[in-house]
Every structure is written in C-alpha cells, then in structure tokens.
Image (cartoon, grey):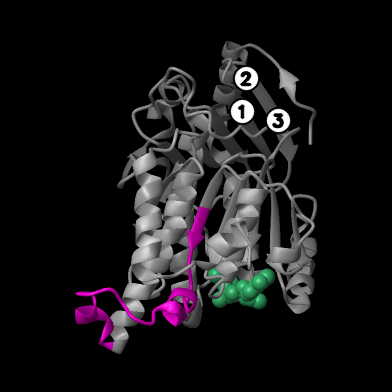
C-alpha cells in the first residue's frame, strides 16, 4: 500500500478522473459519505462496467436511502467530474490492478491511498439485484453462504438476506453518525473499531468488514464468541482471506472479556440475556453506536407473576404473554439506553419471512440531556410490572 499522499482537492479529483481515460480497466467505483457543508443528491453512487450488445457501458446506481435507481452511460458520457465534485467524502476506484481511495476530511482536505491488487470486473448486465455483497466474494464462499461456484446456497439464503439488510442499515447509520460528529471519521491511522458480540459463524462480522472496506472505510473489526471452535474457524478464514490485520476473533464470554474499547457494538441474535451482556459491555466500553437485534427473551417472562390489571386480558394467553414480555424486555433495554444519552430507535431489519427475530435496536450516543419525565416513566413501568430487567441488574448489581 502506498503511504497516504497530501495533494490539493483539484489534484485529487484530477487523479481520480485520470482513471476514466482507460474505462476498460475500471472494475467498480463507489462514492459515499458527505463532505462538510455539502449535500450530494443521493446517499451513494455505485458505478460498474457492463457489457450491453458488445459495447462497454458504465452502470450508475444511485441510492437515496430508500431505493436504488440505475442508468447506463457510454464511458464518454459518464459525468464523472460532476459526481466527484458533488459532495461525497469517500471515493473508491478499483481498476483491474489497483485500488484508489480518496477520503475528504471534515476540513475538506483530501487523503489519497493507492493499493496494488487484482480487482476483477464483472460485465454481466443484470447480474445482481442491487446486492451489496457479491455472491462471488471469496468470504461468502469461505463462510459457507455461497457454494464454490459463487451461488448463494438455498439453505443460506435467509442468512444472506439478513446480512444484506443489516449492511443496508449499518452503512447510512454510520455515515450519518460520522457526519453529525457522533463518531470520529475513520482514518487509516485511527480506524473505526467495530465489535461483534456473540458473533458465532461470523457471517455478519466478515460481511461488515468486507463491505465497509470495499467502500474505502478504515476499520478494525473484532468478533467475540464464547466458543473456541468459532474463534479458531473464523481466525483461520481471516488468515486464508489475508485480512487478519483488520479482523480478529476472540473466544470469550461477553461479560468477562478484557476487551474494553469500541466505537460501534453490534450483536445479532445473541441468546437471551447475552444481548444484555452485549449492551452492558458496549456501555462500559463507551461505544457510540449500537446495532442490536435481540434473540429469545426469558428474563422478563420468568419475572411476570401477577400482571397488573387489566393486563391479564393479554397475559392469560401463553403466546401473547410471551410476546408482551419480549416487547417489555426490549422497551426496558431501549429506555435504559435513552437514559444514558442515546437516541434510540426500534426498526424491522429484515422481512419476517427470513427470521421472526427481526427487531433491531439502533442507538446513537448524542449526549442529549435526559428529560426527567423519561426517568419517571421508566421507574413507573418497573414498579407496575414488578420486574428488574437483566440489563438494569448488570449495570447496577
Ligand atoms: C444465535 S447465535 C448468533 C450468531 C451470529 N451473531 C449470527 O447472527 O449469525 C448466538 C451466538 O452467541 C454466542 N453466545 C451466547 N452467549 C454468549 C456469551 N455470553 N458470550 C459470548 N458469546 C455468547 C453463542 O455461542 C452463539 O454463537
């Protein structure tokens, strides 16, 4: 990798534009992030070469945060200078033999890094339905989501959809947290530190690493799971993929890990109160952004003895009592985060047909002052239901 080079913004754009003099060499281009005081028309632009009736075109996909639109251009018509100057802060250009990445800092200073490597172009026209992860990506084959010919295995389609949807949520969340100053802009010397708690087979961990790196973000990813077999398998895959410097796996109980620093904490389906361990760890580690999809919940359910009336209309029916307990558990988790200065949202992160555990808690530390009424509501809810959530017990033993 070349050392980062200091140049003016004009020189940086000229260097980027130069690549388009040899359009047949371009593998893909991604423009993302937002420069200070600028407002690009869309959240990100993806450009890739496509072969249409034996002619080379560039397919430009733009994403406004809700939907993706695509348009094909002849190389000579591609408005690349307009794109470069329209306010994106991260520009990645992969050619067949190198990767050029330009980051424009909050002070509007460009930082360029160029890495040698082999980046293949796939010219098939309708190859993917706006997928973020290329099924041919070697990591998908290594973790067992794709077969060796690069086809998603039928048995792993749900997992693949979960991971894709997670990335679709994570990326704009990260970008806006960085833009709002809630997260430091990642730099090669100070990469964004992302910790995946209860990572299991690490589909999500590897996907997050591969995708964020592919859009030029400097990251360090750590996966934690109590199982040593997961750690060994995942570290072996990282070694095989040649990414061990930026991703590593530890075999530890979340509540006992000596690891104590993260910018972003993620946990997807960490069983029962392991989700509370993950949130509690993230709070102690001063993570600024949490993306947590809870799994099964037993903690509040086991504490619900006499429900306050007239709630027995719900709690007398087993399945409804269970669902109510799940909602209460997550509502308590979210309120605890809110009381600690986080902006919190509950979102559906993937269609219910892919997993019934599809609620995602997204929390960004804004440090906003806490309204005393929110404390009162939390306490009232606890005393109404006569429960003490696991997360509260972990934070105040
Ligand atoms: C349902 S799997 C989810 C794996 C992965 N996050 C995913 O979504 O594919 C839950 C994982 O959490 C791990 N786990 C459960 N409790 C844990 C704890 N207290 N500390 C560390 N890992 C834990 C399990 O070993 C398991 O691999």
Q: Quadrant of residue 270?
A: bottom right
Q: In which quarter of the image is residue 251?
A: bottom right
Give the Cα distance between marks 2 and 3. Answer: 10 Å
Locate the N terminus and report the quarter of the image it occupies.
top right
Image position of 113 with respect to 49: above or below? above
Q: Find out if the beta carbon at label 3 lies less than 8 Å from the nearest ligand 1 atom.
A: no
Q: Nearer the viewer, residue 348 or 241?
A: 348
Q: Find out if the beta carbon at label 2 lies less than 8 Å from the nearest ligand 1 atom.
A: no
Residue 169 in the image: state x and y as whole percent.
43, 51
Q: Nearer the viewer, residue 273 or 111?
A: 273
In the image, what residue occupies the spot 70% across and 39% down? 191
The tally of labels here is: 3
Which badge, 2 or 1, is on the more N-terminal residue?
1
Residue 85 in the image: state x and y as whole percent.
46, 19
Which element type, helix, strand or loop, lies under badge 1?
strand
Ligand 1 appears in which quadrant? bottom right
Which badge, 1 or 3, is on the more N-terminal residue?
1
The residue beneath circle 2 is: 110
> In the image, is 5 to the left or to the right of 68?
right
Judge the density around disc 2: few (<14), some (14-19), many (≥20) Cα neighbours within 10 Å: many
Give the Cα distance between marks 2 and 1. Answer: 6 Å
The residue beneath circle 3 is: 113
CB under 8 Å between callouts 2 and 1?
Answer: yes
The residue beneath circle 1 is: 102
Residue stretch rendered in magenta on the structure: 291-317
Which element type, helix, strand or loop, lies under badge 2?
strand
Answer whether residue 299 is visible to the viewer in this image.
yes
């Amino acid at each position: 990798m070349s050392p980062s080079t200091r140049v003016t913004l004009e020189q940086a754009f000229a260097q980027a534009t130069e690549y388009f003099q040899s359009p047949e060499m371009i593998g893909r281009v991604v423009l993302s992030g937002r420069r200070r005081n600028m407002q690009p028309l869309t959240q990100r632009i993806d450009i890739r070469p496509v072969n249409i009736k034996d002619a080379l075109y560039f397919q430009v996909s733009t994403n406004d945060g809700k939907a993706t639109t695509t348009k094909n251009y002849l190389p000579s018509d591609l408005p690349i200078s307009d794109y470069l100057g329209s306010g994106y802060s991260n520009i990645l250009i992969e050619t067949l033999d190198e990767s050029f990445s330009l980051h424009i800092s909050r002070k509007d200073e460009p930082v360029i890094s160029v890495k040698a490597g082999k980046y293949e172009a796939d010219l098939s026209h309708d190859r993917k339905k706006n997928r973020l992860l290329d099924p041919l990506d070697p990591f998908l084959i290594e973790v067992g989501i794709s077969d060796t010919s690069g086809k998603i295995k039928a048995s792993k389609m749900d997992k693949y959809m979960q991971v894709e949807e997670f990335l679709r949520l994570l990326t704009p969340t990260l970008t806006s947290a960085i833009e709002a100053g809630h997260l430091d802009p990642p730099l090669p010397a100070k990469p964004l530190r992302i910790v995946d708690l209860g990572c299991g087979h690490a589909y999500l961990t590897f996907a997050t690493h591969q995708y964020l790196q592919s859009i030029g973000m400097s990251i360090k990813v750590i996966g934690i799971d109590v199982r040593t077999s997961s750690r060994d398998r995942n570290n072996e895959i990282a070694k095989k993929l040649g990414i061990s410097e930026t991703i590593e796996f530890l075999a530890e109980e979340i509540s006992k890990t000596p690891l104590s620093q993260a910018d972003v904490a993620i946990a997807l389906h960490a069983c029962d109160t392991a989700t509370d361990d993950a949130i509690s760890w993230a709070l102690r580690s001063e993570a600024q952004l949490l993306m947590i999809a809870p799994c099964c919940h037993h903690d509040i359910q086991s504490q619900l003895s006499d429900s306050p009336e007239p709630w027995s209309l719900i709690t007398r029916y087993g399945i409804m009592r269970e669902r109510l307990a799940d909602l209460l558990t997550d509502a308590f988790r979210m309120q605890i985060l809110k009381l600690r200065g986080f902006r919190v949202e509950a979102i559906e992160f993937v269609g219910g047909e892919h997993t019934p555990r599809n609620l995602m808690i997204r929390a960004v530390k804004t440090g906003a002052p806490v309204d005393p009424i929110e404390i009162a509501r939390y306490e009232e809810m606890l005393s109404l239901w006569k429960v003490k959530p696991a997360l509260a017990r972990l934070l105040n033993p």
